[in-house]
Amino acid sequence: MLRLGLSVAVAIAVADQAFKAWMIPTMQETGAFAVTSFLNLVMVWNRGVSFGMFGGGALPPWLLAALGGAVCVGLGVWLRRADGRWLAVAIGAIIGGALGNIADRLARGAVADFFDFHVGAYHWPAFNTADVAISIGVVMLLLDPLFRRDEKHRLGK
């Protein structure tokens, strides 16, 4: 399971950085634009933590990267003990997303965010592909007990 989770993490981190390498210069050239009636592509530099909380440069990027690294180490310990593919993929997705955002903080001093979903005048904070992977991984973790219960029921345990 460790190999599976780490493969997912590496794939997500590489895909996130590749997307950002393409999007950052593109967005700097074109600026924000509407993709659909509910999605804009924008260029936002997040200097805070999730969704820009505690932004404004109050915490240095290296500290936020170190905290993210500590979370990755803890998740790595959990991944090593994972006993199912679903759990390994979930943890790998979170680690991969965290690594993508850590790379931004270390290389750029802030996390590049692009996706601006909105309903009318209400805008969700901008986010990126790494954030999507983290969110999906967390949802998978929350659903993991449901799948395990079903698995045990089918096996008569």
Image (tube, grey):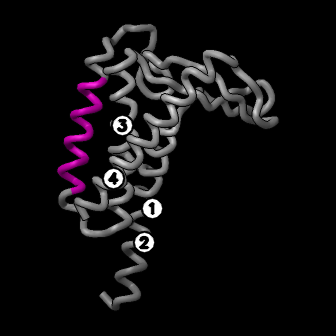
Q: Compared to 102, does 109 lie above or below?
A: above
Q: Earlier in the sequence, mark 1 or mark 4?
A: 4
Q: Which mark is residue 143?
A: 1
Magenta residue span: 65-79
How many other residues sit within 10 Å of disc 4, few (<14), some (14-19) or many (≥20)?
Answer: many
- Contact (CB < 8 A) between labels 2 and 1? yes
Residue 52 - label = none
Residue tagged by mark 2?
147
Camera-side mark, 2 or 4: 4
Disc 1 from disc 4: Cα separation = 13 Å
What amino acid type is highlighted by mark number 4? Ile
Q: Quadrant of the N terminus?
A: bottom left
Mark 2 closeness class: few <14, some 14–19, many ≥20 residues within 10 Å: few
Magenta stretch, overall SS: helix
CA gap between label 2 and label 4 equals 15 Å
- Give the image location of residue 99, x and y in percent: 33, 36
User: Is residue 56 found inside the magenta-colored segment of the image?
Assistant: no
Q: Amino acid at mark 1?
A: Leu
Disc 3 is placed on an element classified as helix
Image quadrant occupied by the C terminus = bottom left
